Image (tube, rainbow, N blue to C red):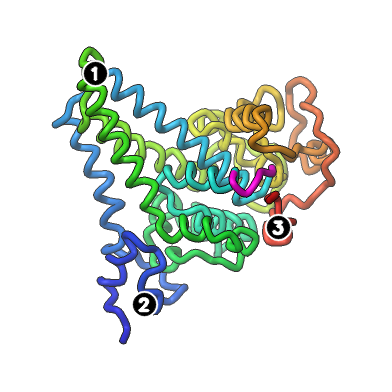
Amino acid sequence: MKTPRFLASMSRWIDSSAAAEAVENPEDQRVDWVRALPFFGLHLTCLAVFKVGWSWTAVAVCLAMYFVRMFAVTGFYHRYFSHRSFRTSRAGQALLAVWGSAAVQRGPLWWAAHHRLHHLRSDQPPDVHSPVQHGFLWSHVGWILSRANFPTNLKIVADLARYPELKFLDRYDTLVPFLLAVSLLGLGGLLQAVAPGLGTNAWQMLVWGFFVSTILLFHGTGTINSLAHQLGSKRFKTTDESRNNFFLALITLGEGWHNNHHHYPQASRMGFYWWEIDLTYYGLLALEKLGLIWDLKQVPDDVLEEGLLDAPEAPAPVPGTAVPAASAVAQPVREPAQVVG
């Protein structure tokens, strides 16, 4: 007996694999309004700031949670799980997945699968979040809410799907965010009791530290899909409309060097030149120094010279390392496994 659609949608609030027999036509791009209710609810909870008020402590935690989780999205979900641009141990991989899951942007397999498909057909009709094909609003948020884009395409992430811990986090993708929200609630209550001078409390910490921060994080990340294919400059000739944008690079810790990235997706850095600020890459270098990750893929010198539309008016580029040249189009499924252990 087939599960009614609205019950299937509700069950997926907790278990993304629930009611698999009720998954709609993969070509059905209509918004699943029932399943999308928690998403809209997250936005509405931000209005609670008028009830709980604010404090410098709450605002500072909000910003800290934004940047810490943005780093998890850009450094781990994107550069590791999607492009395998560095290596780590199996335990390290699990830690990166948990950290990334805290961003409330679905599970690591779902995120990586959609991003790999984006590179394979960037700005072509099958690209589900191309502003060139579908407009700003759909590329920024609409595609996430559609029925067709909800399931995880395990075939495109077969190298990751062999790890049961990653499949668990992908299936129960609300578990880590829930634990984070509860932790922030408890932190606020603790600070109210032991450090009342900070002027915060449990509910204020929950609203600012989790809800407001999460919504800012979502829309900050979304600009790479929507704006980074419309606003900015193109250094390299690519098959899409990816662009470099300094402002977007700041708010996304380096992702705004998007034309660079589409020219050579395998690199662990997106700021190809020293003057292109890429905070995610600096963070990955720090993790490498600590021995948590290693073998960061660099940009080969010849790649920096290929496909230039205009010679950059700046000092010489940072030299790359001996990484074999590769196509500008990502080929994630054919990459060798990067996990040790």
**Looking at the image, is 326 positioned above or below residue 24?**
above
- Report the residue that reaches farthest toward the top: 197
Instruction: Find numbered disc 1 in the image and state the secondary structure of the residue it sits on.
Output: helix
Residue 90 magenta-drawn? Answer: yes
Quarter of the figure that contains the N terminus: bottom left
- Report the residue that reaches farthest toward the left: 51
The residue at which mark 3 appears reads as 331
As drawn, is 285 to the left or to the right of 53?
Answer: right
Rounded to the nearest whole Å, what is the CA distance between mark 1 and mark 2? 50 Å
Work out whether residue 45 or residue 142 is closer to the camera in this orientation and state it.
Answer: 45
The residue at which mark 1 appears reads as 194
The answer to the question of whether label 1 and label 3 lie on touching residues, with beta carbons closer than 8 A, is no
Kind of residue at badge 1? Val
Instruction: Find numbered disc 3 in the image and state the secondary structure of the residue it sits on.
Output: loop
Rounded to the nearest whole Å, what is the CA distance between mark 2 and mark 3? 31 Å
* Disc 3 residue crowd, few under 14, some 14–19, many 20+, Cα 10 Å: some
Looking at the rendered image, the disc whose residue lies closer to the viewer, 1 or 3, is 1
Mark earlier in primary sequence (2, 3) = 2
Q: Which portion, as a residue range, is magenta? A: 86-91
Rounded to the nearest whole Å, what is the CA distance between mark 1 and mark 3? 52 Å
Mark earlier in primary sequence (1, 3) = 1
Question: Which disc is residue 22 wearing?
Answer: 2
Residue 144 magenta-drawn? Answer: no
The residue shown at (73%, 61%) is 334
Residue 94 in the image, given as x and y percentages of width and height:
55, 48
The answer to the question of whether label 2 and label 3 lie on touching residues, with beta carbons closer than 8 A, is no
